[in-house]
Amino acid sequence: MHGMGEAGDNGAAAAGTSPTATISFPLSELEIRARNHAILCTIGFLILLPIGALVARYSRTLPYKWFWAHWIIQLVITLPIIGYGWSLGYRTTASLELGHFVDPHEKVGLALLVLYCIQVFGGAIAHFFKLPTLFRGHRPPHSYFHAILGLAIFALAQWQVHYGLFTEWTFATGGLHKVPESAKNAWLALVIVFWVLYALGLALLPRQYKQESQARKARKADPNSTSSFT
């Protein structure tokens, strides 16, 4: 038996592998579904939605209608991706037969979906119902609520993806496959890049407020003026 062990070790060395190397198994159907859920939701919440927010942050002081680019990204492009990604997560949970919305990842996933729907609806209200007479031409409170809720969604989504990568994947798959370090590094990069770009975009606020003040003065001088802010 000892001789067989030596032969096995020599064979492994000849093949260029360690005698203790683990065997790599292909992803199961459930794991593929869970992986696709993670990829789609990450694209939706950590790439597309932040891009839409940055479009609004950087271009709202420029002389063109930024809203439609923002709206197309946040709704037309992102909704199908988030919706399908979320459904894959729901189906994965159903396959595990452990009950729905019982752990933090599932509960936060549902909360994010609801908040996203509220945010889309709130964005339409903020854009189309400014109520200038009621608020004397100033930005209405629901516009600020829309911006604050958007940032809260991003922070929660960043936590959610982190939990999925570092905790939920291991639980759902039994630890058979580890999350690549590249995926964890990508998560960190997306978080840092968004907050840095958003913080830099805040430097445009003085220009934005100046333009809004000029629009209010133009409307006061001429009620038929088309000057406005969004």
Image: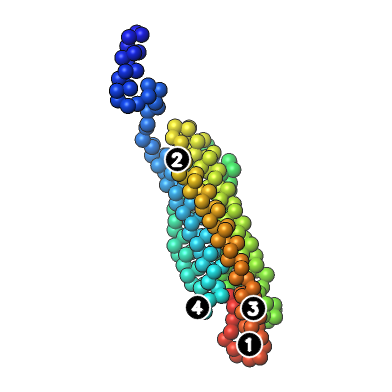
**What kind of element bears circle 2?**
loop
Q: Pointer 1: residues within 10 angstroms few (<14), some, or many (20+)?
A: some
Q: Dot 4 surroundings within 10 Å: few (below 14), some, or many (20 or more)?
A: few
Give the residue pinned by disc 1. Answer: 218
Which amino acid is tagged 4? Tyr
**In this rendering, is residue 89 above or below 149?**
above
Badge 3 amino acid: Lys
Secondary structure, mark 1, is: helix
The residue that disc 4 covers is: 64
Residue 132 vs residue 139, the one in the foreground: 139
Q: Earlier in the sequence, mark 1 or mark 2?
A: 2
Q: Is residue 175 above or below residue 109?
A: above
Q: For marks 2 and 3, give the CA distance.
A: 47 Å
| Label 3 CA crowd tier, 10 Å (few <14, some 14–19, many 20+) | few
Quadrant including the C terminus: bottom right
Residue 179, given in percent of the width and then of the height, sits at 46, 39
Task: Say what secondary structure mark 3 lies in.
Answer: helix
Q: Residue 162, how many percent across, how many down?
A: 54, 45
**Residues at discs 4 and 3 in contact (Cβ within 8 Å):** no
Cα separation between marks 4 and 2? 42 Å
Judged by depth in the image, the label closer to the viewer, 1 or 3, is 3
Badge 4 element: loop
Q: What residue lies at 64% left-to-right and 73% top-to-bottom?
A: 206
In the rendered structure, the answer to whether residue 17 lies left or right of residue 54 reads left
**Numbered badge on residue 180:** 2
